Amino acid sequence: MGHALQPFDEDKENTVSNPIYLALDLPRLDNAVALAQKVRQHVGGLKLGLEFFCAHGHHGVHEIAKIGLPIFLDLKLHDIPNTVAAAMQAIHVLQPSIVTVHASGGRAMLEDAKAAAGEHTKVVAVTVLTSLDDGDLSRMGVAGSAHDQALRLADLAQEAGLDGIVCSGHEVGAIHKRWKNGYLVVPGLRPAIPGVSHGDQKRTVTPSEARNAGASVLVIGRPISRAEDPAAAARAIEATL
Ligand SMILES: O=C(O)c1cc(=O)[nH]c(=O)n1[C@@H]1O[C@H](COP(=O)(O)O)[C@@H](O)[C@H]1O
């Protein structure tokens, strides 16, 4: 029997009391459970990505849900509308708080994804991945800056009736001005600690910069999961917000 996932409470401003979602990007389920247990007092939710879902599927989601925090299922769905809608229906039973799709899948895909989602699930569209910069976009044939592209795709997501978007901290302020009640998810966050690794992330800001610019949710992975003391790292980040 699976453990029922609970939608989380939030206030009118589309914020949660602790906006940090820990990205549980670990290959082993036992390690993911142990990490989540360690930091559960200092984060508002847990994000499970493609790596986790491919390895552990629905069973893995149920195991993590037992920890008692809202679950963000980051599957970044991107396919024809019919396929994405069917995938959304297949994860209904998990009742995730948040699910991601790619905004570049187009308006019909976004509309069908939202229509197929459970009523307590927020569907948010990834605009421009935080691992990409202007040069990467130009090589993909996208004219203009990552900033402008993120704003364009945020407008598309809003027109399609989604709950919000995923963007970097570089754009969240501008998107917040255009979409006041949008649910704005910001990854690519790095605390202002000397020598902190940015890894594959190119458009980064600190957690407090993102929060002050209007982020509803702060997605943080390696700065917590790879810290010597993950609970202390999460606590230190929480204290800056
Ligand atoms: O959708 C996401 O969560 C996401 C979008 C994006 O543009 N950039 C991004 O890094 N993410 C996710 O956010 C997390 C960031 O992890 P760290 O770089 O380790 O903090 C990873 O799980 C990514 O899959």
Image (spheres, rainbow, N blue to C red):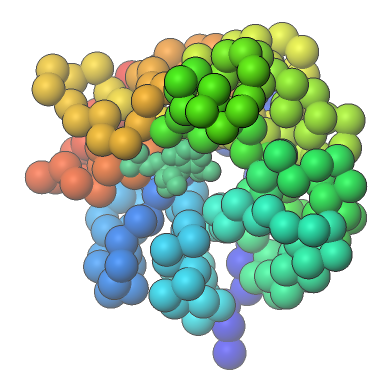
Q: Is residue 165 left or right of residue 140?
A: right
Q: Residue furthest bottom?
A: 1
Residue 223: image location, x then y, percent: 25, 37
Q: Is residue 97 left or right of residue 107?
A: left
For residue 15, above or below residue 123: above
Pick whichever, 214 or 142, lies toward us.
142
Q: Residue at x 18, y 26 (%)?
A: 196
Name the quadrant containing residue 25: bottom left
Check the picture and name the quadrant holding the N terminus. bottom right
Q: Residue at x 69, y 19 (%)?
A: 151
Residue 201: image location, x then y, percent: 35, 31
Instruction: Ligand 1: give its quadrant.
Output: top left
Task: Please say whether residue 156 is visible from this viewpoint.
Answer: yes
Q: Residue at x 37, y 56 (%)?
A: 24
- Total numbered labels placed on residues in the image: 0
Task: Please say whether residue 181 is visible from this viewpoint.
Answer: no
Q: Is residue 24 left or right of residue 142?
A: left
Q: Residue at x 49, y 18 (%)?
A: 134
Pick whichever, 119 or 106, lies toward us.
106
Pick whichever, 25 or 228, lies toward us.
25
Name the quadrant containing residue 34: bottom left
Q: Is residue 2 left or right of residue 176?
A: left
Name the quadrant containing residue 89: bottom right
For residue 12, above or below residue 27: above
Residue 162: image location, x then y, percent: 80, 40
Residue 124: image location, x then y, percent: 69, 42
